[in-house]
Image (cartoon, rainbow, N blue to C red):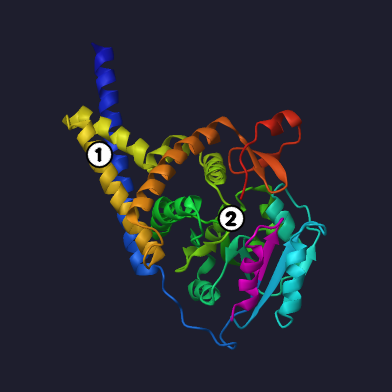
């Protein structure tokens, strides 16, 4: 009898937990939609040379893709009055060099340096690659921008606009430029929907949710934390840069405009591997997310809550689950429309197919993240450890198990 009572209490508690999590996630949906409408897609006023603080832009490159030249050229062409462009390449033989040098000749008036060779300060190849640029940077505002990103004339003024005296780091939420093909639609649906939901709601609530794809920070804060090399021990260096700012009493804020991803190489398999890699990083930093991470997704949360409501209130689980799917689908569409801020480049039927594909791929990405502890990233293979640190994997036996690539 006692065992039966304990079982009933445990099931009731689990059902209550499902409902509480559901309410919290749906509130996150609403917060992100409202925050997007209030905060995002606001173009700032242009800055004169006298009022514009100098910006050192670190651009780490490894290899090339079909859109690299266009992405890089957007940084040469931006009309921000005071900036230097520090392009970092680890190897003289890297094909990216053949893209950079013609652009430097085409735009001789742009303050640009090509720094080759890197400097090994840890296991993070991106940090190692950027070190020479960081060491010669002459401005206190440091912007880190990945190779696959492009900018507009509003991007740098927007970052500066949010860099108030009490702010240490401003980051841009990743979004995508629309490209041809179904894989591009899936990426746009994800970054403008599910990713935006958690990213914008977390920032609205003051949670450190930084991605280093495109962000601006104060060099003085990094120096106080030990310099850029201090973050070479982490794969998720962006998160710990944000933490270094908050630990010193500075705010971390999201900008109004997006980090526009424009990679020329993309596919559904690459998208799944990328999601698995990000999942591994989250799980290594916060192991509790092994349980909570799936509950931020539509299918897992819907099934869990349908059971909880049936167990407590005898609500028909199929009816609830179908209503849940419809409501979640509509809210993701509203979220994406708000992020895109103009007519979507695909119709509602294409959105529906891409949305379903993304939800299913998420399951496989999560399973891969659990089964495979290794990450293949840039020029190395790494195994994640608790706390966000990583060790480089060198044995062939370990490398065979790694199937997650950064793209």
> Any mark on residue 238, and which?
2
Secondary element at tag 1: helix
Q: Quadrant of the N terminus?
A: top left
Q: Is residue 59 magenta?
A: yes
- Which residue lies most toward the top here? 1
Q: Residue at x 47, y 68 (%)?
A: 257
Mark 2 surroundings within 10 Å by alpha-carbon count, few (fewer than 14), some (14 through 19), many (20 or more): many
Q: Relative to residue 153, is residue 330 depicted above or below?
A: above
Q: Nearer the viewer, residue 241 or 70?
A: 70
Residue 39 left/right relative to 90: left
Q: Residue at x 29, y 24 (%)?
A: 10
Q: Nearer the viewer, residue 261 or 121?
A: 261
Mark 1 surroundings within 10 Å by alpha-carbon count, few (fewer than 14), some (14 through 19), many (20 or more): few
Among numbered discs 1 and 2, the one appearing first in the sequence: 2
Name the residue tied to disc 1. 322
Q: Nearer the viewer, residue 128 or 356?
A: 356
Q: Relative to residue 268, is residue 398 depicted above or below?
A: above
Mark 1, mark 2: which one is toward the viewer?
1
Q: What segment is highlighted magenta in the picture?
A: 57-79
Q: Residue at x 54, y 41 (%)?
A: 276
Q: Residue at x 74, y 61 (%)?
A: 96
Residue 228 lies in quadrant: bottom right
Residue 157 left/right relative to 299: right
């Amino acid at each position: 009898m006692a065992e039966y009572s304990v079982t009933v209490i445990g099931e009731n508690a689990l059902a209550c937990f499902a409902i509480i999590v559901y309410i919290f996630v749906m509130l996150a949906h609403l917060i992100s939609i409202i925050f997007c409408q209030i905060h995002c897609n606001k173009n700032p006023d242009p800055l004169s040379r006298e009022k514009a603080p100098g910006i050192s832009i670190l651009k780490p490159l490894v290899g090339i893709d079909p859109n690299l030249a266009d992405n890089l050229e957007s940084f040469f062409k931006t009309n921000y009055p005071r900036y230097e462009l520090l392009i970092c390449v680890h190897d003289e033989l890297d094909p990216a060099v053949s893209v950079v040098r013609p652009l430097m000749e085409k735009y001789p008036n742009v303050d640009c340096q090509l720094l080759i060779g890197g400097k090994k300060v840890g296991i993070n190849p991106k940090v190692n690659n950027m070190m020479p640029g960081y060491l010669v940077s002459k401005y206190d505002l440091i912007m880190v921008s990945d190779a696959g990103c492009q900018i507009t004339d509003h991007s740098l003024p927007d970052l500066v606009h949010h860099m108030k005296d009490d702010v240490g780091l401003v980051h841009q939420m990743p979004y995508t430029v629309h490209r041809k093909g179904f894989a591009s639609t899936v990426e746009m649906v994800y970054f403008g929907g599910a990713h935006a939901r958690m990213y914008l709601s977390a920032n609205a609530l003051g949670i450190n949710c930084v991605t280093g794809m495109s962000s601006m920070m104060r060099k003085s804060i990094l120096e106080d934390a030990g310099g850029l090399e201090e973050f070479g021990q982490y794969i998720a260096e962006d998160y710990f840069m944000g933490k270094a700012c908050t630990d010193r009493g500075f705010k971390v804020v999201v900008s109004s405009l997006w980090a526009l991803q424009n990679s020329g190489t993309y596919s559904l398999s690459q998208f799944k591997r990328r999601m698995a890699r990000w999942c591994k990083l989250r799980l290594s930093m916060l192991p509790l997310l092994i349980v909570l991470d799936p509950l931020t997704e539509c299918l897992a949360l819907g099934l869990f809550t349908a059971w909880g409501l049936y167990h407590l209130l005898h609500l028909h689980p199929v009816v609830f689950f179908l209503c849940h799917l419809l409501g979640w689908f509509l809210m993701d569409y509203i979220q994406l429309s708000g992020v895109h801020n103009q007519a979507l480049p695909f119709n509602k039927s294409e959105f529906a197919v891409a949305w379903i594909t993304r939800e299913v791929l998420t399951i496989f990405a999560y399973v891969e993240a659990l089964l495979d502890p290794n990450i293949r990233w840039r020029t190395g293979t790494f195994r994640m450890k608790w706390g966000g640190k990583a060790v480089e994997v060198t044995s062939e036996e370990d490398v065979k198990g790694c199937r997650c690539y950064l793209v």
